[in-house]
Amino acid sequence: MGKHRRFGWLAIPLFLSLPVLWAGAQGNGSPGGAPQGTPAAGPPPGLTLKFAAPSATRGEALSRSCAGCHGPAGVSTQAGVPGLAGQVPSYTRFQLAVFRAKLRPSEVMQRVAARLSDQDIADLAAYFAAQAPGPAWTADPALRARGAALFQGGDNDRNVIACAVCHGEDGRGADRQGIASVTNLAPEYGLEVLHEFRDTPRFGVPHPDAMRIALKPLSDDDLKALAAYISSMK
Ligand code: HEC
Ligand code: HEC
């Protein structure tokens, strides 16, 4: 998988709770983004979903079409495909909304999401959130130890925030803030997504600045260590 796909997905739930970061995260004129220099007014339109109380049972039925790639019950067995089991529902909903709005790249997921209604998205998110995250992937012990130290403790000397501050010591994220669960994340996807957060310059729509800032001081080897650790947290 390439490291340099254009990457326009958003961290709006977090921005809503971190106005300071939000103020710095403006679009630059791409679809859905505000023109350069215009203050960001909030989420681009079309990303606010309308749904009744989510039904995990209905979500389970809908999820059968996802299993071929994301694994049975959302437990991925492909290192390049993220698992969905145990993901916080706000994160899953938001990612499906940004795929559907074609703001997050992925031909396959844009096609999948185009068929989903707001209610489908909410039901799927509720179903996957109720599943236990997949088992730990196998990881190199030395890499994993280095990743664990960074994730849990950060690195003061280099201005690295402990990932656990946002993602939790157990990596399970936070639904209210839209912070993703990263526990046992598929390792190749994990490494790729860390590179994207760190390396892709801002463009288009408000970017996940929380992650970009968190990852900025980190080297390629750090990212490898972190991907190894989060893929094998439990
Ligand atoms: C043909 C394979 C395929 C199918 C079918 C598929 N997905 Fe995906 N999905 C992917 C891939 C690959 C990615 C990673 C996209 C990327 O490169 O960023 C992904 C990413 C996602 C993400 C983002 C996860 C994250 O951690 O950021 C969500 C949510 C998701 N898919 C939900 C679904 C749901 C719900 C269905 C069924 C309705 C589904 N997918 C069907 C392949 C698939
Ligand atoms: C200030 C809070 C914050 C910190 C610190 C932080 N993250 Fe995140 N992280 C987030 C948010 C919010 C998201 C969801 C981004 C989005 O909506 O696009 C996220 C997303 C992710 C994802 C994507 C998950 C997926 O399924 O695609 C990974 C992997 C990740 N973070 C790992 C890390 C690691 C490793 C660190 C430490 C170096 C870290 N994060 C530090 C807030 C944070």
Image: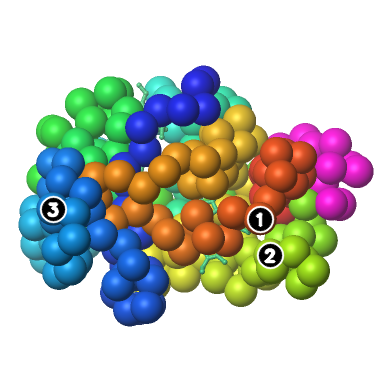
- The three-letter amino acid code for the residue at tag 2 is Val
Q: Name the residue under label 1.
A: 217
Whether residue 88 appears in this view of the structure is no
Sequence-wise first label, 3 or 1: 3
Q: Is residue 113 left or right of residue 76?
A: left
Q: Give the range drawn in magenta.
A: 137-146
Expressed as whole percent of the image width and height from the top left, the position of residue 176 reads: 37, 74
- Mark 2 CB near ligand 2 (8 Å cut): yes
Q: In this view, does 129 lie to the left or right of 29?
A: right
Marks 3 and 2, Cα distance to the nearest angstrom? Answer: 32 Å
- The three-letter amino acid code for the residue at tag 3 is Pro
> What SS does tag 2 mark?
loop
Mark 3 is surrounded, within 10 Å at the Cα level, by few (under 14), some (14 to 19) or many (20 or more) other residues, namely some
> What SS does tag 3 mark?
loop
The reply to whether discs 3 and 1 touch (Cβ–Cβ < 8 Å) is: no
Q: Which mark is residue 113?
A: none
Q: Residue 35 carries which label?
A: 3
Question: In percent of the image, x 89 and y 42: which residue is there?
Answer: 141
- The three-letter amino acid code for the residue at tag 1 is Pro
Expressed as whole percent of the image width and height from the top left, the position of residue 85 reads: 48, 48
Marks 3 and 1, Cα distance to the nearest angstrom? Answer: 29 Å
